[in-house]
Amino acid sequence: MGEQEAKTRLLDQVVDHLARHGLGDLSLRQIAAAVNTSHRMLIYHFGSKEGLLVEVVRAVEANQRALLSTLEASDHVDLARQFWRALTDPALRAHERLFFELYGQAAQGRRGTTALMDGIVESWVEPIARMEEARGHSAAQAHARARLGLAVVRGLLLDLVATDDVEAVTAAMDMFIDLMAD
């Protein structure tokens, strides 16, 4: 197994463990023990606990973008509804919870996790804006619509993590999709 494969496998194990158990105040040694490796191996691959956490969130976000790219729909409204239903799958709830836990830490500037903020919006806004431009919106409108969509999705996912009220949150998302359908 190559070094990159080993790093990817290790990252996947950490993501799964943290999604199931949360981060709390786990030390790098505790995370390493939970995934049957050493803290030195985590440092080797990720540089620090903070570097690992940044990679965890980036992996969760990359998985969501990959999910979006696999969906097939007849139109943008159907695509948005399919993506929302995929994001709200109960099997992903732990990953959503983990995202918000780490995002909150980075927003507070906790222990060097601020690198997480680099690209956390742009990595979504840019591809969604391209989709909006393809639908005939100007570049400025497309970027504003993409940012609004991202904010609404993240806000409703946070609501879902907090309340577990799938029906109400999905009704709100369906209304937003209908409002943005033009």
Image: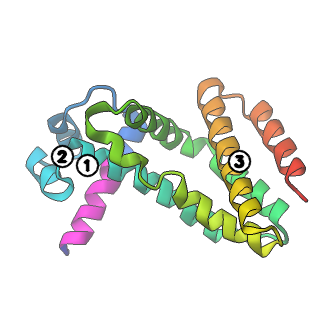
Residue bounds of the magenta highlight: 3-14
- Who's the residue at 25% across and 49% down the image? 51
- Magenta portion: prevailing SS class: helix
**Residue under label 3:** 148
Q: Which mark is residue 48?
A: 2
Residue 54 locus on image (x, y percent): 34, 48
Residue 61, percent across and down? 49, 54
Q: Quadrant location of the N terminus? A: bottom left
Looking at the image, residue 7 lies above or below residue 25:
below
Residue 52 visible here: yes
- Residue at 83%, 61% in the rendered image: 78
Secondary structure under the numbered disc 1 in the rendered image: helix
Vertical placement of 80 versus 97: above or below?
below
- Point out the tag, 3 or 2, that comes first from the N-terminus: 2
Q: Is residue 7 magenta?
A: yes
C-alpha separation, residue under disc 3 versus residue under disc 1: 29 Å
| Horizontal relation, residue 77 to residue 142: left or right | right
Whether label 1 touches label 2, CB < 8 Å: yes
Residues under labels 3 and 2: Cα distance? Answer: 33 Å
Instruction: Say whether residue 179 is left or right of residue 173.
Output: right
Is label 3 or label 2 in front?
Answer: 3
Tell me, yes or no, whether the two marked residues, 3 and 2, touch with CB atoms within 8 Å. no
Task: Residue under label 1, please give it.
Answer: 51
